[in-house]
Image (tube, rainbow, N blue to C red):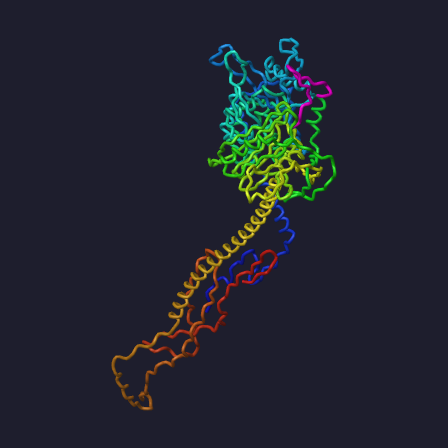
Amino acid sequence: MSSTTVPTHLPSPGGAPPGSIPPEPPRRGWWMTKRFLLAAVGIVLLSGGATAAVALNEVSKVVEALGQSKAVTIAPKLLTPTSKGAPETLLLVGNDERPPPKSNPFGRVLPHSNEMLLVRIDPSKPTISMLSIPRELQVTFTAPNGEVITNRINSAYTYGGAQLMVETIKRLFGLTINHVFITSFPKFKQAVDELGCVYMGVDKRYYHVNEPGGEQYFEINLQPGYQRMCGKQALEFVANRHEDTSLIRDARDQRFLLEVKAQYGATLFENREKFERILGRNVATDNTLHGQEQVLNLLELLVESQGKPVRQVPFNVSLLKTYDTASEQQIQESVQSFLNGTASIRKPKLGPAAHAGSHAHNVHHHVNASITLTPTTSSELDEARSQAPRLSFPLEYPRARDSLGGAEPDTLRVYAIRDQQGRIHPIYDIVIARGELGQFYDVQGTSWRDPPILSNPDQTVQVGSRNYELFYAGEKVRVIAWHEAGAVYWIENTLTGNVSPRAMLAMADSTVPVIRTSSDGSRPEAIPTLHAVELPPRTAATTSLKFKIGALLGFAGIAVLALLSLLLLSRRRELHLLRDQVAHALALEARQRTLLAGAGASGVRRVQASAPKAPPMPTATPKPPPAPTSAPTAAGAPTSTATAPPAPTSAPKAPPAPTITPEPPRAPASTPKPPPAPISTPNAPPAPAGAPEARPAPRDVPDPGPTIYRAPRRWRLGRRRNR
């Protein structure tokens, strides 16, 4: 008797031979290292690509914003093309073109460059250079009609527009100019209003109103002191060109730009869309800045130089009554200082026995010539005592000042100021005249503890019980500030920075409350005598600490992102392997269940078919057999006959369990064959009539048992893991 034929195994994953263990894969340490490096490089490239895409998108927005204003018509040969990372020289121009006022229909102001400011941004220098060209500088140029004209340099814009102005500046100074920015007075006013106004100090009282029969020029009405200046006030401050020299006028423009940079430079990126909109609507640029490449180079340069201090370069000029003149040597000195005078900032010398505070090192004392300040008059102190009760904090007044003989008396103003949140703070301002034309500095105090002018001090020194914060404008000390009695006080230098650091520190040390209380201590009111003290070196880093930290955090973030991505890829690969194995096991289990169910049912039917049927039970008692009849022994003698049941054969054995082995996928279950025909036994007695048919015993087939499927072992990352 033959058994059911089924497959003895399923093909193992990976093509391994049946019943064998897959060989151990080779070690892949270097292979994984290469994958790690490739993944890290890929992530860095993807991050760089995303950053580049964002940058190009921002550049496109800037180009689109600049396209709101008509481009300045300048011949391409006059502007030097720029390259990535190269220094650039920018020319900022303020066009004072005004329509005639209603009271004077013939009083139209022709176009002329009221302000010409050169800005030099060099990545290899620690500072940004800023040089104002005096508008009254006498020059000779050729007008477009061929006429040779000798006049002020600002009239070149009147005769030939921006083209002739750029030609004249390049020929006179021998400079290369990369880009030109031009704005008008109305647009300047609008830009300041849209920007959100600017907090800055006004050095003195400015006032002029055009009256019939009087001198007619730009009207101005500004009070002295630290204040919030919006479009109208800012325009009056930068456009005023009377009462002082051209150097003072240019210094006002530079101070305003410095305050704008200090207050809005840190938020330039987060508010870039606002600045782009303001710049595009109110500033006209040359044609080269209407393309992405030049804009991208300029933006990269500006971002890199964001934390650099601005160095104000004075123009070496001879001041005359009507014109300003400059020899060839004076012009070259100014140009060289503008281009190459950006060496490391010199170490200024300050006064008394000071030692460095929280941001400084030890200070070395040197015996030097002392400085003597002029004492404050009693009338000025009396005026201060009368105004002190109007303040909620002590009014401090310097007992000595740096001024020349015949200087104007001090001016004291008590007023209020609103901070960015709209809170009102009392404040006072003391205007001190130094005795030179246009030279004024201010001593101020307020209960507003953190005005924008005192953000981010460059240095801190300690003198006695006070800590002084120093703020620099390039190489000069611009502000010295200190905190005490719940208020903040500071001394702001002149527009051109003519007061020396030692004199400013001496005046700060002599500034005490005009009304003393028992808690004021015993600070001497004697006029201080200062000995030279060399401050610790103040390095001018090309990149701010904030920018460096941001760059380091950026690289660290990319590295962490690369590691996390690798870990994620590894986990994902492992998860895919596990899913494949689980799916394979589930499919295998489903097929085995189907085969086992079919084979089990078939085996039961075979066993039932091969088992002998039991004889039927008798329904009545059988009659006894008839008595045998005797017959003669001779011929014809009767013989006795009897019918005996056949000898039963041995009981058939139960058929062996069929060998069931799962078949390959999608193979239909085999149908068991019919049982073989019974084998005849020789010399067997015939079966009686009506007896059940005897079946032969099945052959003795050894039982191999079920074939157990063994899943292959998994190998991962060169390590053997047993299930």
The x, y position of residue 589, in whole percent, is: 46, 60
Q: Quadrant location of the C terminus?
A: bottom right
Q: Nearer the viewer, residue 653 or 491?
A: 491
The x, y position of residue 167, in whole percent, is: 65, 17
Q: Nearer the viewer, residue 148 or 467?
A: 467
Whether 323 is among the magenta residues is yes
Q: Quadrant of residue 672?
A: bottom left
- Name the residue at 49% across, 57% down: 582
Can I make out residue 129 in this image? no
Which residues, given as a range, are shown in magenta? 312-330
The x, y position of residue 213, in whole percent, is: 52, 11
Q: Is residue 623 left or right of residue 277?
A: left
Q: Relative to 719, say whether 433 is above or below.
A: above
The x, y position of residue 277, in whole percent, is: 51, 28
Q: Quadrant of residue 357?
A: top right
In this rendering, the count of numbered labels is 0
Q: Relative to 136, say whether 3 is above or below.
A: below
- Name the residue at 60% across, 12% down: 159
Can I make out residue 683 in this image? yes
Q: Quadrant of residue 404?
A: top right
Q: Is residue 126 left or right of residue 599?
A: right
Q: Nearer the viewer, residue 403 or 539?
A: 403
Q: Relative to 646, say whether 208 is above or below.
A: above
